[in-house]
């Protein structure tokens, strides 16, 4: 069976994996398709995207996914599926090669890309759902003001608010990604989740594919799109 790591959105916000992924039906939907699902909480007040990636890579449930993959290859078998929220563990068997499909939502896309760049042995596939971008100066100014109001010092603001297509990596670094990538547009688009970011990612990553768009998971309008989202991620994760 394949494994999926869900990385929730938000930036210096008090949200977690359960709020973003479980209450919206995504965790149970993917687990119901036979996937092993882990949805840890991100750092609430991260100083950098690199720190976020390192924290996720060492989370108990995440580090266990590669071990599950190695066990599955050695045994030649497959286990059941399971899901976890918060920072809990995982069930079932891991993805092929000990790697996982990483699904980032909104600002979780920035973390997902950083994870793939810093821990390439962990990430086998990337799904960038509703990528949040700060390439629009007015959006970047608004986000900077909000983070500053929450107490983020200037050095942290500079580390988090990159001006590339995604704030966690320069576009040249994105071009270096070799894993399969799928992009899910926000429908309708909005200033933080613009269609231009999706188009830029598809240009930067020639092998990337676009999956059906939908509203971001936390929005009420996402509910009618849940099954389409689950189907698209399941098919992509299955390779």
Image (cartoon, grey):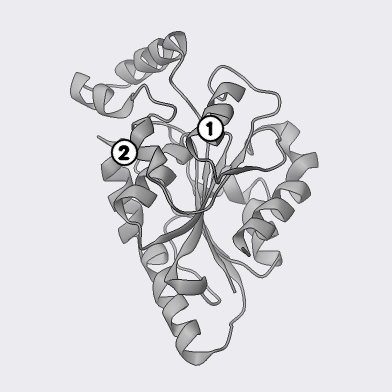
Q: Is residue 98 left or right of residue 224?
A: left
Mark 1 lies on residue? 203
Image-quadrant location for residue 82: bottom right
- In the structure shown, which secondary structural element does the residue marked by tag 2 occupy? helix
Query: Residue lying farthest right?
Result: 224
Mark 2 lies on residue? 49
Whole-percent x, y for residue 17 in the image:
50, 48
Q: Earlier in the sequence, mark 1 or mark 2?
A: 2
Q: In this view, does 83 lie above or below 96?
A: above
Q: Which image quadrant: the C terminus?
A: bottom right
Whole-percent x, y for residue 215 in the image:
69, 32
- In the structure shown, which secondary structural element does the residue marked by tag 1 occupy? helix
Q: Is residue 86 left or right of residue 83?
A: left
Judge by depth and name the residue closer to the eye, 132 or 202: 202
The residue lying at 34 percent from left, 31 percent from top is 170
In this rendering, does residue 62 appear at all?
yes
Q: In this view, does 21 lie above or below 90?
A: above
The residue lying at 41 percent from left, 47 percent from top is 177
Q: In this view, does 196 lie above or below 101?
A: above
Image-quadrant location for residue 66: bottom left
């Amino acid at each position: 069976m394949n494994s999926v790591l869900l990385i929730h959105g938000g930036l210096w916000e008090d949200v977690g994996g359960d709020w973003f992924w479980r209450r919206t039906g995504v965790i149970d939907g993917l687990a119901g398709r036979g996937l092993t699902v882990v949805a840890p909480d991100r750092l609430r007040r991260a100083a950098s995207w690199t720190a976020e990636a390192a924290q996720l890579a060492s989370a108990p449930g995440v580090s266990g996914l590669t071990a599950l993959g190695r066990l599955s290859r050695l045994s030649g078998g497959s286990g059941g599926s399971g899901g976890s929220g918060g920072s809990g563990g995982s069930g079932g068997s891991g993805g092929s090669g000990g790697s996982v499909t990483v699904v980032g939502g909104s600002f979780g896309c920035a973390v997902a890309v950083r994870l793939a760049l810093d821990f390439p042995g962990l990430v086998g596939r990337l799904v960038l759902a509703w990528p949040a971008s700060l390439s629009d100066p007015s959006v970047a100014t608004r986000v900077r003001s909000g983070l500053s109001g929450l107490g983020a010092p200037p050095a942290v603001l500079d580390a988090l608010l990159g001006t590339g297509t995604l704030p966690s990596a320069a576009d040249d670094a994105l071009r270096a990604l070799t894993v399969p990538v799928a992009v899910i547009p926000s429908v309708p688009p909005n200033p933080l989740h613009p269609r231009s970011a999706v188009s830029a990612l598809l240009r930067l990553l020639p092998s990337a594919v676009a999956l059906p768009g939908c509203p971001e998971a936390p929005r009420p309008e996402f509910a009618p799109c849940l099954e389409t989202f689950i189907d698209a991620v399941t098919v992509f994760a299955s390779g």
